[in-house]
Amino acid sequence: MFKSALLASGLCVALTGAAVGGDSMDDVVRLEILDGGQTSDGTYVAALRISLHDGWKTYWRAPGDAGIAPQFNWRGSQNLGNVSMTWPAPEVFDQNGMQSIGYKHELVLPLEITPERAGLPVHLRGEIELGVCKDVCIPSTLSFDHSVNVDAARSPEIAAALAQRPFSRFEAGVTSAKCRISPIKDGIRIETHIQMPSAGGREVTVIEPGDPEIWVSEASSTRRGDTLISSSDLIHSSAGSFALDRSQIRITVLGDRHVVDIQGCEPG
């Protein structure tokens, strides 16, 4: 799927690690893991810090048609029960007439780690596949091998990234989020009606169906007073019929003032 996304972007060049304009890949993108200590619940706080050279960017979990979604592999880790990610609010980019969503300069991605066996050390080992883009997009695989430091002090970088998380429904003043679903030739059209104050400027809506096998078109959005109306087409990779669980639909609204994260929608 990662390779397919690269080909679909039409901007990918294949490199075997040497150079981009004289720079090595280490000069373009670097990865390190930050430690943030232990919570009162017994989980561990950490973060992936992805540093990018000037002019380069990487992508959010839902990167848009011109972006490349990151893929995470934790299979080499030890005593790892669960990893929960808190994505900081991303930016919207216009890329060759297409929309992409991601980060410039740096992405600090906070993690909350639940150990498989409480009280025992956790070791993180694996890799991230991601696209880094400037004039071209380059597939990059970043490896990590890190023992979590449970005694680490609170990390200012992680705290700052957590403070950049999107607003919740309550924080954004969302009073209702409804989804209207109708069939189209190859799939389903979803129209969302969100009652909330403006997030500022041009509001970009991203709809995630909760199933990685479902492709979602870039949403078209318009505002009518307190209601933001957005529409996307959904098509399953099998090209067949599929069910859509409204409770799993995730709607993100990106505005100039803030970003809003809405989980689930009601019929209507």
Image: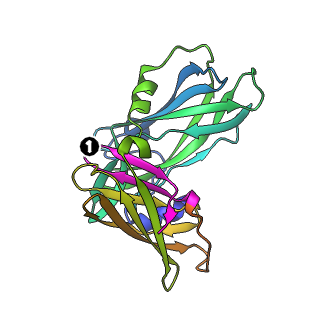
Type of amino acid under label 1: Arg
Q: Residue at x 26, y 43 (%)?
A: 257
Q: Position of residue 62 (x, y in %)?
A: 45, 55
Colouring scheme applied when the structure was drawn:
rainbow
Between 57 and 223, the residue placed more toward the observer is: 223
- For disc 1, the neighbor class at 10 Å (few under 14, some 14 to 19, many from 20) is few
Report if residue 266 lies within the magenta region. yes
Tell me, yes or no, if residue 90 can be seen here: no
Extreme-right residue of the structure: 117
Q: Locate residue 207, reporting x and y percent.
A: 45, 61
Residue 62 relative to residue 253: left or right:
right
Q: Position of residue 133 (x, y in %)?
A: 36, 51
Above or below 121: residue 71 = below
Picture quarter with the N terminus: bottom right
Is residue 259 positioned above or below 189 on the image? above
Q: Nearer the viewer, residue 14 or 142?
A: 142
Q: Which residues are magenta?
A: 247-268
Q: Which residue is mark 1?
A: 257
Residue 63 against residue 167 in the figure, above or below: below
Q: Can you see residue 105?
A: yes
User: Horizontally, is 171 left or right of 213 in the view?
Assistant: left
Q: Residue, x 57% and y 73% (percent of image)?
A: 236
Residue 127 belongs to the span the image colors magenta: no
Q: Position of residue 154 (x, y in %)?
A: 50, 17
